[in-house]
Structure formats: structure tokens, C-alpha cells
Amino acid sequence: MSGKIIVCAYHNVGYRCLSELLRQGAEVALVFTHEDSATEEIWFESVRKLAAKHGIPTETGDINLPENVARVREIAPDLLLSFYYRNMIKPEVLEIPKRGALNLHGSYLPKYRGRVPINWAVINGETETGATLHYMVEKPDAGDIVDQEKVAIEFTDTAHDVFGKVTEAAVKVISRSFPLLINGTAPRIPMDLKTGSYFGGRKPADGKIDWNRSAVEIYNLIRGVTHPYPGAFAELDGKKVLIWKAIPVEGEGEPGKIVSVEPLRVGTGAGLLEIRSLQEDGAAEVEAREYVRLAGIKGGSFS
């Protein structure tokens, strides 16, 4: 299949989409990726190793650096494709590829434009999301849509579960779209930003639980940031406690107050939250029953 490609990729979506391009015989001239961060749990596949396995040159420096822009110009690619690359690519780079620069975004655009769309969708209690391939423009996640695929979010899904579904959807989209991009027949559907939404990035501190919210809302936060993400947390007896698994149940209680210890149930703004596993800061994660026993919990309140 003809047409020189530059790929910007990271994470499982980057790994799987690059794999699909190679399966289709794409001529990938260069891959931009990232160095893994020592402060981040690396639970995903390595784009860098995949590229090396196939003898493709890789670069971990920002594609927007002058020397890298010059390198892209020298290669003069037909397409530039971005799969979970974490740097915003500047317009001067987007203008270089002959057939355009496209991004694979982890939502059903125009909903959930911006950062960590899967986590936000779970936190907000959405029942579906998706993967969207779109042309890149200066504004993030705003260019014409080529193709997209929906996925369901079950009430019991964590963000990690949904990420797996979105990854599969992304591969389907690339599988369908790449041949059309190469032969110049891919559709371009204008994005109506008025019908969508934009969300920014999240920090570990954003996982703090507000017990005045409903049990369902707190549950959505917990499953939206549980493993392998930093987790939702609260304080009990002056100690930070990460809550990794919980479920909303019927009942009433003062927000944050422990209403029973076996099972461990806490009052919220509406309903009760039954905590299933948790972790005191600096200790190992344990089941709630074991935590109650080890910590000698008789009652009290989370804050």
C-alpha cells in the first residue's frame, strides 16, 4: 500500500492502531512516542518496542521541536496519524502531510473533547462512549470526522474496562478508514461543537470524595479512577484512605458517617456506599472487612 506515514502514538491505543497499520502494509517512516514516566503506573503496551521490532525509527522528543518539524518536512509524509500522543501538535506540523493529519480520540465526538475522555465518561455516569478518527486542526478534537464507533459502558465497568472496549473500537475504525485515507476517498463530516462537550485533564487530587454527593455519583468517581489510575480517596481518623472498590446500596445516613462496619457502609447525600476494598496511605490494599478488623473501626466519619 503506497503512501508514507508518520505516526505519533503511545499507550495501548497507539500500540494496537500502529499494529493495524503495519498489518495493512503501511509504510511507516517514523514514529513519535513518549518516554515512560517514573511516576506513572505503566500497565500498557510499548509503542517504542513495537516500532523497534519492525525496524521503524522512533523519536521521543516533542514533534513540535524545530529539529523535529524539519525532520517531518524532510520525510514529506502523505499522512500524519496520532493515536493517544500526549502533545498538542502545532499547526505548522499539521500542514505538512499531503493528505492531512488525523487523530484517534477516545470518545464519540463531539462529546468529551479534551483530556482523559474515558475517565470523564465513567465519572459522569455515561452509558456509552466510543472512538473517533478526525482531522486535526488548531482547536483540540474539533476537525472533520472520518469514522467513529460506539461502545457501551455498563454500570459495573471501570475506566480500565471501558478503555479496553475503546481500544477495540479504535482498531475497527483504523481498519476501515486507512485504505480510504490512502486512496483519497475517506469522508469528511464537519463536527458540530455546539452539540458536544469539552473536559480538561485530571490530577490525583481530583479523586477526593465529596460525601454530600449521592452514592451513585461517588461510585462513578471510584470506578472512574480505580486501578490502574490514582484512585478516589477520603480521610478517616486523620489518615488518607484510598477506596478502590465500592457499590451503592439503599439506605440513609449522614454524609460521610459510618452507619455499619460489617458490611462497611457510609452515608452520602443520597443512599449508602458499601465499601468493598480500600487502602490506608502507605499500606497494602485490603478487603473492607479486614480493614475494619485491623484498624479496630467501630464507627466514625469519613471526610
Image (cartoon, rainbow, N blue to C red):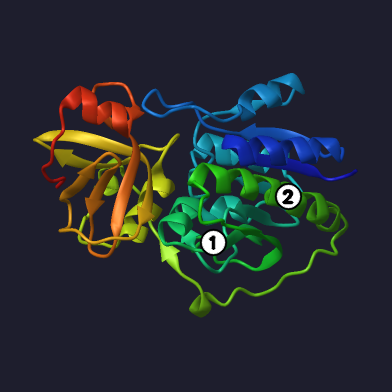
Residue 154's spot in the image, x, y percent?
Answer: 56, 56
Is 189 located above or below residue 165 in the figure? below
Instruction: Give the side of residue 286 with respect to residue 253, left or right.
Output: right
Mark 1 and mark 2 in contact? Answer it, CB < 8 Å: no
Residue 23's spot in the image, x, y percent?
Answer: 84, 36
Q: Nearer the viewer, residue 260 or 266?
A: 260
Residue lying furthest right: 1
Instruction: Give the side of residue 248 with respect to residue 99, left or right.
Output: left
User: What amino acid is at disc 2?
Assistant: Leu
Query: In the image, what residue occupies the spot 65% across and 75% down?
Result: 190
Whether residue 209 is visible here, answered yes or no, is no
| Mark 1 neighbour density, 10 Å: few (under 14) some (14–19) many (20 or more) | many
User: What amino acid is at disc 1?
Assistant: Asp
Query: In the image, what residue occupies the spot 49% across and 37% down?
Result: 62
- Residue linked to disc 2: 79
Instruction: Give the side of residue 142 with respect to residue 98, left or right.
Output: left
Secondary structure beneath label 2: strand
Residue 258's spot in the image, x, y percent?
Answer: 18, 47
- Residue linked to disc 1: 141
